[in-house]
Amino acid sequence: MAAPHAGPGIMLLTASMQLLYKDWRAWELCQQIIRCQDGKTANGVLPPAVASLVDQIRKTLKVRTDPKDWEQIQLRRYVNTLHSSVPLCGTALIDQTNAEKRILIVISEVGIGAWQDKVIVRAKETFHLTAQETTVVQHLLKGWTNKEIANEMRLAE
């Protein structure tokens, strides 16, 4: 039986980080992230991980000035909470009527499955992985790209 509030949450912000819309599920997941990050928020509303993602999209919008490019901007981050990994997906939108930039954030919850834990344990035993290599495997199981993993771990790709 599905949880009553299962599914993704949606937030819409202006390019200046003003919150235009936040549904109930996004609010719940943001609260979950905030609790796992010492109760800190950015701008009084957003978890720091969400604010960081929005800021990265804003920086990209300054470099990629053609509105056609904005449709292709899509960034992902994962935030670990107590019981799950929460993927954040952000994309840039443009209102064609007044050329206003907006940022759409989709937040969902992905429980870490038992099969993933088994894969990690087996890989550690079979290949005698270091802690850093184990972290790479964990990120690969989340679907991260090499570039995303390198950025998260502050390493060269």
Image: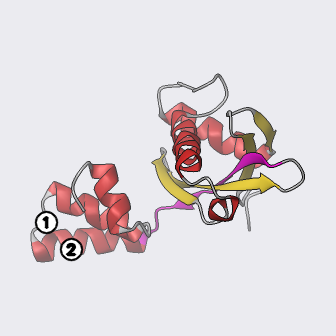
Number of residues whose C-alpha sits closer than 10 Å to that of mark 2, classed few (under 14), some (14–19) or many (20 or more): some
Callout 2 touching callout 1 (CB < 8 Å): yes
**Residue at the limit of the structure toward the left, as seen here:** 128
Q: Where's residue 33, x and y in %?
A: 55, 39
* Res 133 quadrant in image: bottom left
At mark 2, the secondary structure is helix
Residue at image mark 2:
123
Q: Where's residue 25, x and y in %?
A: 74, 48
Range of magenta residues: 99-114
Residue at image mark 1:
129
Which SS type dominates the magenta stretch?
strand
Q: Nearer the viewer, residue 151 or 31?
A: 151
Residue at 32% from the left image edge and 67% from the top image edge = 146
111 falls in the magenta region: yes
At mark 1, the secondary structure is loop
Residue at 28% from the left image edge and 69% from the top image edge = 120
* Res 127 quadrant in image: bottom left
Residue 120 in the figure: left or right of residue 100 = left
